[in-house]
Amino acid sequence: MSSTLDKVLDGLMSRYKERVPDVSSIINAMIKENIIQQAADIENDHIAFRTMGVPHLGIQSLEKIFLHYGYHKRDYYHFAEKKLDAYWYAPPSPQYPRIFISELRVKDLSPEVQQIITSYTNEVTADPVDRLNLDDAHAVDQFLHSGLWRLPTWSDFETLGKQSEYAAWVIYNRYYLNHFTISVHNLKDGYNTIAQFNEFLERNGFTLNNAGGKIKTSPDGGLLQSSTVAEMIDAQFAGGDVHSISGSYIEFAERRILPQYAHLPKDQIRREHRREGFEAGNADKIFESTYSSQTNR
């Protein structure tokens, strides 16, 4: 099973790197400053997907893929203002990233916007994951990078974006990886806190999401996160219109050692000794990495 999961994750990451040139740029800058020797030295804290909360789709559908590969469903999060629900999933073993899947509460949006969304999602008449052979890594990879509905029009995309930029992002980008996350706490001294890593990023010309401050910190102080602003991609809409829209971005996470393990020598610290899970307040602002308030800065 692990080899299938490896192939699915590799497929996600290879397409993500193609769409987000910042990934290679950051990795190259890390190698140049001798923070890492190669890309494989980076620990991927988590990857994230965005979905639509409509029949046959959403969290209940997409999660089946990862539950099949041994992931375990963990905490629920609600984002009232953004009208989102989310869960995170713990990996089958520590070398794999956590997974964060969010879902738009479509029924909480205006009738006009609901009608636009369902005009696309109603093309999906049965849960597409149920028809997938989850042991076929190539089939799963293809599914995660295929359109589930017709190409949206620019006018529908704009209308959605006025009420929910998340809705507009999903209607165009579908299951494309929304972000991957570099674990900074495992990097070498001088770069292993979010503050230090942000300084490195900005010194190398990367723009950070500043919604709620550049560093998002959980109330317990154990989880600190930051992210780049999403890169703009040239997107082709129905009828051949091409417009620049936000694609994906990169996140950075520092998980601090839990107080009960503070006595352990550094070389004995494992993933289970650090702050686990996520924080709704942090994630709420990280979502805005694809929003125009950030990409237009």
Image (spheres, rainbow, N blue to C red):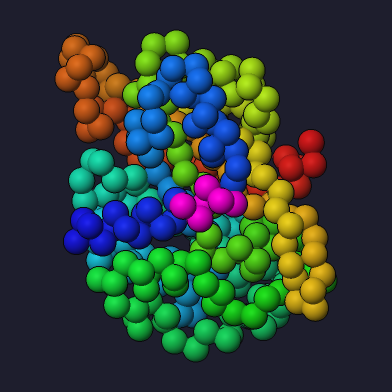
Magenta-drawn stretch contains 17? yes
Q: Nearer the viewer, residue 249 or 282?
A: 249
Dominant SS in magenta: helix
Magenta-drawn stretch contains 219? no
Q: Quadrant of the C terminus?
A: top right
Q: Quadrant of the N terminus?
A: bottom left
Q: Nearer the viewer, residue 217 or 202?
A: 202
Q: Name the quadrant containing residue 121.
A: bottom right
* Residue 44 in picture, x, y percent from top left: 38, 39
Query: What residue is at 40 percent from the left and 44 percent from the top?
Result: 46
* Residue 232 in picture, x, y percent from top left: 71, 49
Q: Image check: 79 left or right of 136?
A: right
Can I make out residue 71 in this image? yes
Query: What residue is at 35 percent from the left and 36 percent from the top?
Result: 40
Q: Nearer the viewer, residue 84 or 93?
A: 93
Q: Is residue 32 above or below residue 124?
A: above
Q: Name the quadrant containing residue 7.
A: bottom left
* Residue 26 in picture, x, y percent from top left: 54, 31
Which residue range is magenta in the image?
Answer: 14-19
Q: Nearer the viewer, residue 24 or 85?
A: 24
Can I make out residue 167 in this image? no
Query: What residue is at 60 percent from the left and 58 percent from the top?
Result: 83
* Residue 30 in picture, x, y percent from top left: 49, 24
Q: Image check: 116 left or right of 123?
A: right
Query: What residue is at 47 percent from the left and 74 percent from the top?
Result: 57
Q: Image check: 192 left or right of 200?
A: left
Figure disc tally: 0
